[in-house]
Image: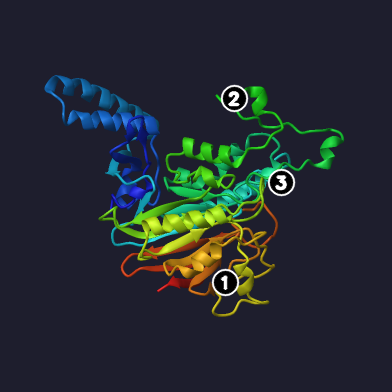
Amino acid sequence: MLKNRGTAATNLKQDSGESDCHFILLPTKTVIDAYPNRHLVDAKEAILATALCSAMMESSPTQLSILCIACFSLYFQLILTLGFDYQVLALPKTSENCLRMRPDAPFKIALFADLHFGEDAWTNWGPRQDVNSIKVMDTVLDDETPDFVIYLGDVITANNIPIANASLYWDQAISPAKSRGIPWASVFGNHDDAAFEWPMDWFSAPGIPQLICPPANSTYSREEACSFRGTHRLELMKHEIDHNVLSHSRNGPKKLWPSISNYVLQVSSFDDTKSPVVYLYFLDSGGGSYPEVISSAQAEWFQHKSQEINPDSRVPELIFWHIPSAAYKKVAPWFGIRQPCVGLINKERVAAQEAEMGIMKLLAKRPSVKAIFVGHNHGLDWCCPYKTLWLCFARHTGYGGYGDWPRGARILEITQQPFSVNSWIRMEDNVVHSRVVLSP
């Protein structure tokens, strides 16, 4: 039970390659309670302290004395910082793209869609919406204690962010999962690197408001970092990956650029990391700096990758992107939501991608594909069957963006034996609704 959340551990790397273990700092009481709250130790200290203590096991008496002093000195520093109720656990190593089931328990995922951090940041309204969005995520994470979080696009509203400080808002958005030691992955939406839209009132008195400039780094000087330029998808993803050991996000193949967030993660059996339970595919549906579309090149990449890792379609597959495809229009309920569709709100028309380049034909023909999950439409939260799979919206999570419908998040629960995917919506007021079985 204590090692079951290898997925919640930090995937730490050294210059020579992957480390042999994952490390996580947990409160002692939380360990006893199967740690509903997880706290990460500083990565460098955890690596060094645990590496030293591991080396003690293979050292000579003289070396052992030196290593003991160094090891316990580091642990003492951790205790002074974090208190006596914490301990470092070494968890089994897994592949960089691999998550693990918990023993005798389902694998639970929370989907956070359309957070829209950084919207109207120069006003009092904007920062309040970000605070409210944090509260929604806190409620969902505390109620559901998921194993994994997926940020389903429009994490930020880049068209409201005039300078290259979008990563500051991105960091705020992922902070609820990060502070609990929950790993996550993200895909881009149409607002995440949209061009800045200049407010007309900035050109009247009192002019442009004070801006929060990012610190200078190896790429940009202080002046360049505070210039009026946005933050591209590549920069956002690089920042997330480089600064967050819990992130499972990927840049994806360069041949697919400007589409960035294209990758696949494997959820493995707890007992055998080489035994996949389900594959999670992430696709960049565009928008912002380029058209809203999943390209034919992305469809070809999916076809090749799925044939490579799952040639007989034996392992179930779940798909995640931001902007719905045209197929969502075909199954969209009229007026209310009736069976076989399941959901609570159906308040707007589906805003689909600009074109269909073949991805839906591939997915509909693959028996292993069980469901597709999207965001984008804040006033829709339904799931409807389409041919052999389900098309689902998440639930608008953030207080940024349009619409005043109550906020929440879609939850997925994956069971290994027998395989099944159950889903429901967890609301900001703790209420649960719209339970549906997406796979037998």
Say whether disc 3 or disc 1 marks the residue closer to the N-terminus.
3
Q: Which residue is mark 3?
A: 125
State how far apart marks 1 and 2 are (Cα): 46 Å
Quadrant of res 56 = top left
**Residue 71 locus on image (x, y percent):** 26, 26
Crowding around mark 1 (Cα neighbors within 10 Å: few <14, some 14 to 19, many 20+) is: many
Mark 1 highlights which residue? 343
Which amino acid type is shown beneath numbered disc 1? Gly
Q: Nearer the viewer, mark 3 or mark 2?
A: 2
Residue type beneath disc 3 = Trp
Nearer the N terminus, badge 3 or badge 2? 3
Which image quarter is the N terminus in? bottom left
Above-or-below relation of 227 to 380: above
Which residue in the structure is indicated by mark 2?
216
Query: Which residue is found at the position 24% from the left and 22% from the top?
Result: 69
Q: Tag 2, which secondary structure? A: loop
Toward the viewer: 294 or 16?
A: 294
The relative height of residue 321 versus residue 8 in the rendered view (above or below) is: below
Classify 329 as above or below 226: below
In the image, 248 versus 434, the foreground residue is 248
Give the farthest residue toward the left.
61
Q: Position of residue 128 (x, y in %)?
A: 66, 46
Q: For the point 33% across and 62% down, which residue is it?
A: 105
Q: Are marks 1 and 2 in contact (CB under 8 Å)?
A: no
On the question of residue 427 being in view, the answer is: no
Q: Amino acid at mark 2?
A: Ala
Please name whichever residue, 372 or 409, is drawn nearer the observer in this view of the structure. 372
Say whether residue 272 is visible: yes
Q: How many labels, in total? A: 3
Q: Secondary structure at mark 3?
A: helix
**In this picture, residue 273 sits left or right of residue 221:** left
Closer-to-camera residue (107/206): 107
